[in-house]
Amino acid sequence: MKAKPLSQDPGSKRYAYRVNKEENRKELKHVRIDEKDAGDKGKKLDLPKKKFYRQRAHSNPFSDHQLEYPSCPDDMDWSRLYPHFYDKENKKMTKEVTIADIGCGFGGLLIDLSPEFPDDLILGMEIRVQVTNYVEDRIIALRNNHAKKMAYQNINVLRGNAMKFIPNFFLKGQLSKMFFCFPDPHFKQRKHKARIITNTLLSEYAYVLKEGGVVYTITDVEDLHNWMVKHLEEHPLFERLSESWENEDKCVTIMRNATEEGKKVERKKGDKFIACFKRLPTPSIA
Amino acid sequence: MALIHPLQSLISNSAGNLVFVVIKSSVLAFKCVDGQYSLVGRWTDDLASNETSKQSEDATTVKKLKDNEGQVVKKAESPAPGIAFSLQVRNLTLTHDESKLIACVDSDKSVVVFEIDEKDGANCLKLIKRQPFPKRPNAVTIAENGDKVLIADKFGDVHRISINQSEVVKSEEMEPILGHVSMLTGVTLAKNSQGQNFIITSDRDEHIKISHYPQCFIVDKWLFGHNEFVSSFCIPSWNPSWLFSAGGDDSIFAWNWEKGSKLSHFDFSDLIKPHLTKAHRGADRFQNEKKDVIECAVSRVLTCESIPFLAFFVEATKLLYVLEICPKSGALTLKQSIKFTHNIVSLSESHDEFCVTLDTSKSDDEEYVNFVEYDQETEDFMIDIAKSEAFNKALISSVKDDASVKADETDLYSLYGIISLKNMGNIIPDQL
């Protein structure tokens, strides 16, 4: 018999930690944290520790997962993710999600984007369960610890397979920015369809992006960078943005420095390859 | 035990005097003159027959796997979920001018194109092209007035090939024109009321996607509403902006695809319940404690060519349901149900006449095919006994001594593969 992994061994620290955090998450995930909660009774929540959320680095995007997704964008209850932006009187959201971080990993980008775009709702999508839990716990703790300033109310994460279900979440032209940071390179040729940027998937990203919206890509794998650039350049609905545009865009700076992967590459003194593309207007068809 | 394997597929030309059928890995053509059918064409997939013999050898050697400690464990071969693996021919499609017949062949994942040469009385099926694909083709539609065909595969990609040239394209050089990250179950072209062309694709993740054609990179919309996989959809020629779809759900859906709105749905769960058998009991690993999980799925939904009716059947049942479609609202009501002597395997339509092929493998019956016509006087659908008998007689006399089409218990499961499209993620918990 193979030994049980630590996460399933009730005697392990990791197990105890996960159970504790899960209870916490259930309680606080969809709660509106207000200013009055801060101060006197506002006890600081510890930020989650990554070591307790380890899991395999890869997830097969083709396999059937236990996923929750709305049957169509209108069925999506965003108030659970962004309670602060829910207007109880009119029973509708005051803002909608306009920025998506596809494969958000441990959520570094979300957290750095949050104060830069206070008027945008930002959603991270991540396919790995434990990593999603980590980001949720991180956001819960941050919202709690910054309750006075109402910070981090505009970011959240959900577990999902963006390659399959992105149109279930977003309406046509809803997004203004999509980030693809350090995606799984899927080196083998027969795995190329599993890459997050393919010419067929780009048509779906173009559908959810508004005209003029931007696709951001960053990777430390040069082959993957060339692949993404090639496919985006070949796609009739995208056009590459210039290097000078990149140098002036604040998101590029954040993306370069914020993500966990980005920091890791920094430590290892590796290269980072960036490419940004603008969503062109849909041509009219006779 | 019946003499021949159930017919997996059948298609007629519009005049009704040519009928093409698939039995195992053979395509047969029958011509009708004065109500009598005779065999006029035949093609057998040689690769498949070689493959079958190779397979039976393999079957005796059990696949060996090693566990984590390096110990050899024996595991019996079983078909993977989601793939009804068989060496068969599927998706017979005629070009609009009926000069060519197209079929998907499983043995080498190829698409075969035949020229139909009616003058050749000995064999009217002339193979002009055999185009292999990187992944198994699963649905076919004709494009560019019969110049091209669109092939939707099990990997989620749609490819376009020319059918008038016999050269074969290298599969590495093929670029998909459109794709899903999910197995595709259907593809068709449609025109909206402004005359713009669209391509509509369905998959096993509940999606029906509508993109412009040939500008497939512009996605127009999705039709949302299915909670299970979509196995089949069709567009009626009498109202080309409507679409009917079905699959793993308990309902048939009616849509206005042009507007992207749902018109109605017809819940058949109560109708079908008394007719579900132990064949519909969910597999053990998906069972609950009471062992009463029932799984069923619609294999096919098809509209009549000129009258407002559609027919559908649930996999592994004997019933064909005909629904009446309100031409104004798209509302669906039950018109009638027709019970056959055996399970329905395939359904096709030609000039308001439905045709079913039946799974006779467990009996000595010779009712392989039943034609169901619309009687103008009674305004009911009924089995055309004379036509059915004439066809079955011709079929049996043509192939009764042919070993390659004889019934064979081992590959019958492939007739019932639709239910395996069900999403397993809702049942099997994720491995973290």
Image (cartoon, rainbow, N blue to C red):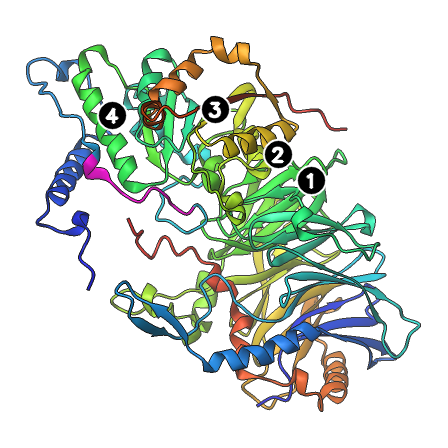
Give the labeled residue for mark 1.
B198
Instruction: Pinpoint residue A167: horizontal percent, then vertical percent.
Output: 49, 36
Residue B90, above or below A149: below
Horizontal arrangement in the rendering, residue B406 relative to residue A252 (left or right):
right
* Secondary structure of the residue carrying numbered label 1: strand
- The residues colored magenta run A51-60
- Closer to us: mark 2 or mark 4? 4
Question: Which badge, 4 or 3, comes first in the chain's sequence?
Answer: 4
Q: Quadrant of residue B274?
A: bottom left
Residue type, numbered disc 1: Phe
* Relative depth, front residue between B429 and A27: B429
Confirm whether residue B7 shows in the render.
no
Give the labeled residue for mark 4.
A139
- Closer to us: mark 1 or mark 3? 3
Residue B333, above or below A240: below
Residues tagged 1 and 4 counted as in contact (Cβ below 8 A): no
Real-space CA distance between mark 1 and mark 2, rounded to the nearest whole angstrom: 9 Å
Check the picture and name the quadrant holding the N terminus of chain B. bottom right
Real-space CA distance between mark 2 and mark 4, rounded to the nearest whole angstrom: 35 Å
- Closer to us: mark 3 or mark 2? 3
Residue type, numbered disc 2: Asp
Q: Extreme left residue here? A: A40
Decide: few, some or many residues near mark 1? Use Cα within 10 Å; few <14, some 14-19, many ≥20: many
